[in-house]
Amino acid sequence: MRILKRHLLLFGFSLTVLMLGLVSHANASTLFSNYTTSFNTAIAQTFMGGNSDYSYQALGESFSLTTSAAMTNLQIALGVNTGSGNVNVSLFDGQPTSPSATSLASSTIYYSSQSAIEFQSINFNANLNANQNYWIVVDPGTSSIWGLWGETDNTNKTGVSVYSNNTWTTYNYYVQGAFAINGSQIQSQNTPEPGVLATLMSMGMAGGGMFLRRLRKA
C-alpha cells in the first residue's frame, strides 16, 4: 500500500514538472520578420565570389529580439544570377554595424545553375538573447557565384552591411534582404507567474489525491 501511494504521489509530481517545462517555451512561431508579405521580385542585393567579374562581396543583415528565444528555423529569399556552387548562410552575434568573428550556426545551399529568387528554409538551432544584435550573413562559397538576396517588400534600409576587402561597411542606402526568424520564446523557468504555478501544482497534486481517495473507498 505504501509503495502504491508513493507511486501515485510521484505521478502527481511528475505531471507538475512536465507542465512547468511546457510553459518555459511558447509554441513555435515567427519571432522576427523584416518583410510584409514577401520579397521584391524585381530587385535584389548581390553577393559575389572573386571570379564572378566583380570583387568578393558578402552581405549581412542585422536583427534583434525583444524577448529571449530558441531559434529553430530561418526563412531567407535567395537565388543565383550566374555561376554554380555553394552559398553559405550563417548566424552571428555582433555589434550594430558588423557581425562578430565566430558563427553561432551555419548551413550551405548548393546551386547547380542559375536560380530564381525564392524562400529557402534552413534549420538553425540557437538560443537568442533579448536586445542582442544578431546578423544573418550570406557569402559565396564558390568563386564563380553571383548570388541574389531578394529585397524586403517593406523597404527597410537599416542594419545592412557589406563585407569586402576584409572590412565590414555599413550600407544604409541598401534595402534589407528578406528573411524571417522562427522559433519559440523562452520564459524564465525560475520565476513562473504565481497563478500559473498554483494551477500546475493543483493539477499535479489533485491527480495523485484523487487516486488515493478512490483507493481508500475500495
Image (cartoon, rainbow, N blue to C red):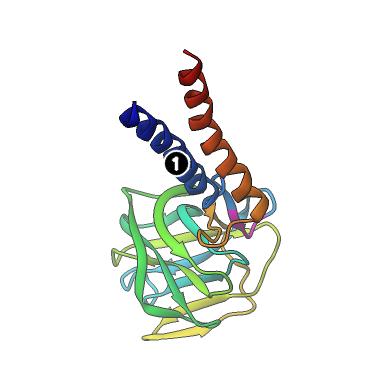
For the N terminus, the quadrant is top left
Question: Which stretch is magenta?
Answer: 31-35
At 41% from the left and 50% from the top, the residue drawn is 122
- Quarter residue 62 falls in: bottom right
Q: Secondary structure at mark 1?
A: helix
Above/below status of 65 relative to 76: below
Residue 147 appears at what percent x and percent y?
Answer: 43, 61
Whether 33 is among the magenta residues is yes
Whether 11 is among the magenta residues is no
Q: Name the side, left or right, on which 101 lies relative to 130.
A: left
Q: Which amino acid type corresponds to the residue marked 1 in the rendered image?
A: Phe
Q: Dot 1: within a 10 Å radius of its alpha carbon, few (fewer than 14), some, or many (20 or more) residues?
A: some
At 35% from the left and 49% from the top, the residue drawn is 113
Residue at the spot of label 1: 13
- Quarter residue 126 falls in: bottom left
Residue 109 appears at what percent x and percent y?
Answer: 34, 52
